[in-house]
Image (cartoon, helix red, strand yellow):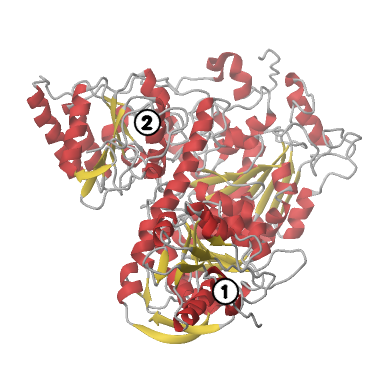
Amino acid sequence: MSLKYITPAERFKRYLPKDYVELVDYGPFGKTQDEAGPGNMGQFKELVEEHPMCSGCWMAYYIRLIFASLPCPEETVTLGTAGCGRLAISQAAVPFIYGNYGDQNAMASGLSRAFRIRFPDKTKDVITIAGDGGTMDIGFSMTMHSWIRGEKFTTIMLDNEVYGNTGGQESGMSPKGAILKMAPLGKQGEKMPATALAQAAGCVYTVRMSPTNIKKAAKIIRRAIFVAREVGPTFIHAYTSCNIEYSIPTEDVFADAKEKEKTRFQFEEYMTDAAKEVIERVEAEEKAASKARKAASKAEAV
Amino acid sequence: MSAIERPQPKKTYADINYLLKEAPRKQHFITGAQAMAEAVKRANVDMAIAYPITPQSEVMHLVGDIYAQGHIKEYYRAEEELGTMSAIAGAARAGVRLFTATSGPGLLRGLEAIVSWSGHRVPAVLGILTRVINAPLSIQPDNIEMAYMLYSGAVMLHAENQQDTFDMTLAAFAITEKVDVYIPVAVATEGFFVTHAKGYVDMFDEEYALPAFDSVAAPVPAMDNETPPARIQRDAPVQKSNFMSYLIHAVWQQEIWDSNRRAMKYIYEYLGGPIEVQNPEADVFVVASGCAAAQAREAHRYAQEEGLSVGLIKVRAIRPFPKDEIRDAVKNAKALIVPEHNYVGWLCAEIKAAIPNGGIVVEGPRVYGGMTLPVELIMKEIYTSLGLEYDLKL
Amino acid sequence: MTKIVTEGPAGYMPQSAPSMGVELAPKGQALLYGNAVTEEEAMRDAAIALLTKKNPTIFPGPQVLWDWKEDVAEKSAAILELASEIPNCKIIPMPDYRPKYPKIDVKAEINPNHPNLTILDNRIDACIFVGVHCHYANLTLRMIRAGTSCYTVALCAYMGHEEAMASIRDLHASDILKFKDIVIEERNKLGIEWATTLPPENSSLEKDDYGTLSPADYGEYRSLIMTKKGEHVTDVE
């Protein structure tokens, strides 16, 4: 574990800002999900806190969830591209690479391969987190080809069905008929079938979901990361509404996410046999470890 | 089998100065593409990413072969040039030594990523094997694409021949990784004229190689979960709507060009300087870079034989551009003739801007679209500049 | 000696030191106001600045703040020894390089994207940067020269910095201790009385107890943290 680079030099700890000391003392680095995971968000120092996302932003919530779910934040690098998401992702206490437009999966291909040759004995999780435009429009070729090449990293698409950051233009992931900027008469084509494309391109684990259930969403994020470590490309297509461009009142954001779960974002999980094997093994291991910890702490209490 | 599990050839690691100046060399008769690949073989490259385009493809085929032989740890064919150049930028964050190459339209397709390399502080070597830019479609040599690279921030070297291609490519790896440089170095040479033609190249044994990439000795932290800080954006989106955000971008840009400027001392150290001057007392100079310099050299030889007062200035470094050196070398010249393999005359514009008396610069001769550059075209300009008649026969 | 690089403010659009013709010092030498000099000469000038100018401050960067390499312990100890000998010296860290959002606590840290905020707010007239990666150090030093009158010292493990008034290259812990000795010598020459004292700890350091923190502590922002099962928060900003 590379905890060294996030451990303050002994002599300097008292000179660090509170923010950083807390991150070291109360952050999730080197901790388990029981200690610092989505189950107790708000009670530990999170990797992403202050961010400039709009009030009621469902994407901001999901990004926080991603970071709280990371199996090993101290061995993780995230990549992103233009869009709202990067405004929050870039605030996380995890290295974040921002390149050019839609190039996150090409960069991640280079990065993850370079990690494998430099650190053959370590596991470094590479995760691209980009919007629907970055993943499926401008970055389409680079996204698809990273999957076709079988690159071992996780792709998460934050689908708000619109170009939010540039002011509400139609994207390939917008639903047919949606009246948006650059689609003044309503979108002509269909919403792109992202998970079907991912499966056709060789992703070994894909999920489409509206992340309304924290526990379930966290489990999916972790599954995608575990499988990418060993088997091949994984993809999560998550609904993260834009309450501004789709005029969703803040108090209705959750209800909207629930509703989308019944329509365009019905839960769909796909995995190959090899992926399933990894998931079953890792989850059994985690369960056993968690049980052992609980037993140990009970014994200590007694 | 993963790259690192494959057997790797035994290497003797040596300092760049030893390799370039002292290591015993043997003469080979090889193409420019081979010369570039042979340099890559001796550079201890970690990873190379390929995408085909004529006339570059030959280089990355050969690099693929040396990967197969175990000289390089990782190599793959990317989806297209933007994907290639982006992957180079991604891999650079992990702290490894990188190489790729492209040509004309491919360079332009990758340009969005390439121009961001300097700002991202990507220490990679880029081979540019020149080719015309469409339309109309052609695969022939013409170095117009270098004009688009001039403001990319990258260090640019222009090789005259196969020997230059070997030495400059090797030196490029040393230059790009200097802590005070750490921006990409492009090594350009003419497609076909150099890449597919054979020439004599003195090379040291392939057992010798540069030492491994040092990811710690860098002006920016590697993003490898080993180097602090964790809360980091090496390439921060710095946009915040206030004065400070503009200033950070402004000083960042200055830093790129300062880094470019700092590369000059290494160009002196490794390549003997950014220009080569023959017959420094001459009245008329032929100033050229790349393949045109080979023709200029020939014109210079003709002129010497005919007893004309003609000198040669070969420009090795296009960025940083040797303004001071050229200004000094031509301070007593009466005319400068700038032969080029492109329509726009980017070298001519650079030279004019470097000297106080731009009026002495003769615009040309220029050939483009893949046409060769007959020495006679240069001779005609020499004669005209000296007030002599020249009977041009082609 | 002609001073090429001097304390600012250099103005709205600063010219970079390299573009003014300043070159990095060769091995074994240092830079002082843009000129190559001996390491001792640069250290002496820097020491006098730190002893005579207001609010001297050391800005340690990530390379010495985080325990990632073997030489960190030795270097950080040496930096604190140096700080203890400069009267009323403060230590304000540069823990990372991303722009601070929503706003920087200028008493607690400095940031390379807007370093002058910390310099100006704390009225720092002389400072030392150590352990900052060269790219960010150059940006920082130039912005400080652009917008403030602060005297800057760069202690660099690599080739040094053109933008600093005094720049030491190839820095080891032993060089920091040598600098400390020069500070003591100059202090005695100037007749300044000072008992070796460690700088005060970071001014932001009062801690929340995360052990007892609950979403309720986030007040009106609690809905942004998470909702309880079945809870429907309507009262938000």
Q: Residues within 10 Å of mark 1 (few under 14, many from 20)?
A: many
Instruction: Name the residue: 44% across, 68% down.
Output: B283
The spot of residue A149 in percent (x, y) is: 66, 63
> Residue C118 — which label?
none
Cα–Cα span, label 1 and label 2: 50 Å
Which quadrant: the C terminus of chain C? top right
Q: Where is residue A125 in the image (x, y as percent from the top left)?
A: 53, 50
Amino acid identity at mark 1: Ile
The image quadrant that residue A165 belongs to is top right
Image-based side of B367 in relation to C10, left or right:
right
Q: Is residue C73 above or below residue A256?
A: below
Most foreground residue, B50 or C211: B50
Element at label 1: helix
Residue shown at the point (44%, 80%) measured from the top left: B307
Determine the residue positioned at 62% across, 80% down: B391
User: In the rendered image, is residue B381 in sight?
Assistant: yes
Quadrant that contains the N terminus of chain C: top left
Q: Which chain carries label 1?
A: B
Closer to the camera, B138 or A40? B138
Q: Which mark is residue C145?
A: 2
Residue topped by disc 1: B378
Q: Which of B11 and B163 is in front in this view?
A: B163
The answer to whether residue C108 shows anywhere in this view is no
Horizontal side of residue A131 vs B60, given as left or right: right
Q: Is residue A254 above or below residue A128?
A: above
In the structure shown, which secondary structural element does the residue marked by tag 2 occupy? helix
Query: Residue B266 location in percent, x, y?
Result: 36, 60
Q: Dot 2, crowdedness within 10 Å: few (<14), some or many (≥20)?
A: many
Image quadrant of residue A247?
top right
